[in-house]
């Protein structure tokens, strides 16, 4: 099964927010693609992208990041409703 990770949408959000330091958090099933995702985001933005290697048990499991991060992007299994 192929997933649409909406990488361009993530890159656009980084650019729109002028984020310089970004953390990405992925569920275990997507962690093998973490470097590919980070590389895409860095190549398409001016941000430095860090990969959260810790656990991710869902949308409520956000990491406590240092204050110098500008943005956290979290991928999950369900779509968020606005």
Image (spheres, grey):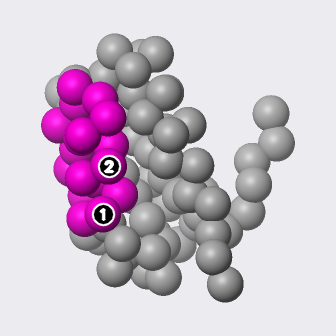
Q: Quadrant of the N terminus?
A: bottom right
At x 34%, y 80%, the residue is 32
Q: Position of residue 36 (x, y in %)?
A: 30, 63
The answer to whether 55 appears left or right of 8 in the picture is left
The answer to whether 11 appears left or right of 45 in the picture is right
**Viewer-proximal residue among 59 and 21:** 21
Q: Quadrant of the C terminus?
A: top right
Question: What is the magenta range?
Answer: 35-52
| Magenta segment includes 36 | yes
At x 46%, y 16%, the residue is 16
At x 48%, y 82%, the residue is 29
SS label for mark 2 = helix
Res 56 quadrant in image? bottom left
Q: Are marks 2 and 1 in contact (CB under 8 Å)?
A: yes
The number of callouts visible is 2
Q: Position of residue 4 (x, y in %)?
A: 63, 60
| Magenta segment includes 47 | yes
**Viewer-proximal residue among 63 and 18:** 18
Q: Which residue is mark 2?
A: 40
Q: Which residue is mark 1?
A: 36
At x 32%, y 35%, the residue is 44
Disc 1 crowd rating (10 Å Cα; few below 14, some 14-19, many 20+) is few
SS label for mark 1 = helix
**Residue 8 vertical position relative to residue 38 in the rendered view, above or below:** above
């Amino acid at each position: 099964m192929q997933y649409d990770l909406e990488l361009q949408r993530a890159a656009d959000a980084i650019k729109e927010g002028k984020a310089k330091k970004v953390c990405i958090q992925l569920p275990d099933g997507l962690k093998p693609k973490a470097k590919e995702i980070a590389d895409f985001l860095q190549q398409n933005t001016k941000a430095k992208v860090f990969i959260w290697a810790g656990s991710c048990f869902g949308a409520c499991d956000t990491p406590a990041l240092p204050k110098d991060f500008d943005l956290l992007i979290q991928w999950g299994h369900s779509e968020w409703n606005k």
